[in-house]
Image (spheres, grey):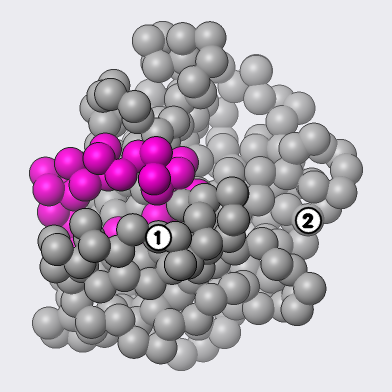
Amino acid sequence: MKIASFNINGIKARLEALTNWLDEAQPDVAVLQEIKTVDEGFPHAPFEERGYNVETHGQKGFNGVAILSKHPLEDVQRGLPGDDEDEQARWIEATVMGEATSLRVCGLYLPNGNPAPGPKYDYKLAWMARQKARAAELLATEEPFLMAGDYNVIPQDEDAKRPEAWREDALALPQSRAAFRELVAMGFTEAFRARVQGPGHYTFWDYQAGAWNRDDGIRIDHFLLSPQAADRLTDTAIDKDIRGREKPSDHVPIWVELDV
């Protein structure tokens, strides 16, 4: 099963770019971030025509996450537990029914946190603590699951072309990196780094200052696999070339293949 994550940066603005990529890449499951629309405004038809079941957790104008799946989706949950007053649409999870077994898929759009310090950074760290709590609940089931999406965390310096430019940014502050490491240390496998080492691998290039042309990127989109899912990992990659196409998102897809 091929599972992809793609921060699309506006489903309506990138609909053609997304459907073209889906036709080429043929993921069985795609988790999307920043759909930037309410659920009622999500364009279901182009995806259903391609055989995808669609589940969304939307929000007007910004945020918003979705799951597209060619397999049945069961037990869909919207919103990250732990804060009943949090209205930001940043988390969706569902069970994907594979041929051999089921897989719990959690799609996430972790808060950016800038400017830091400040309330937005406090929210980011609190959100990561809630994610850790939810992860503990899912680990306790001992069923295969993954958490994929835009983490807005640069795990280490080699994940940025110019690490010095991010020293004071919420994406690379020591507290952000520590929270990410604590999450991984619960027993997760960071799929891409389990297969690919070294610098020069990015998933985001800013629209400003010719970042794409200079390959001035960062790696902030990640797959964390539970032990039961990590045992089934067969491949992973970043579809970098998508960034150079017409009307691209500032992110590119990252994907894993699991034997499920």
The residue lying at 73 percent from left, 53 percent from top is 124
Across and down, in percent, residue 45 comes to 24, 62
102 vs 233: above or below:
below
Is residue 102 found inside the magenta-colored segment of the image?
no
Mark 2 highlights which residue?
Answer: 123
Q: Amino acid at mark 2?
A: Tyr
Nearer the observer, 207 or 178: 207
Q: Amino acid at mark 1?
A: Phe
The residue lying at 46 percent from left, 25 percent from top is 205
Residue 5 shows up from this direction: yes
Q: Which residues are magenta?
A: 7-34
Nearer the observer, 236 or 115: 115
Q: In terms of sequence position, does the residue under pointer 2 or pointer 1 come before the other?
A: 1
Residue 147 shows up from this direction: no
The residue lying at 40 percent from left, 16 percent from top is 212
51 vs 222: above or below:
below
Element assignment for label 2: helix
Mark 1 highlights which residue?
Answer: 42
Res 165 quadrant in image: top right
User: What is the number of callouts on the image?
Assistant: 2
**Quarter that holds the C terminus:** bottom left
Nearer the observer, 132 or 98: 98
Across and down, in percent, residue 209 comes to 53, 9
Across and down, in percent, residue 94 comes to 39, 79
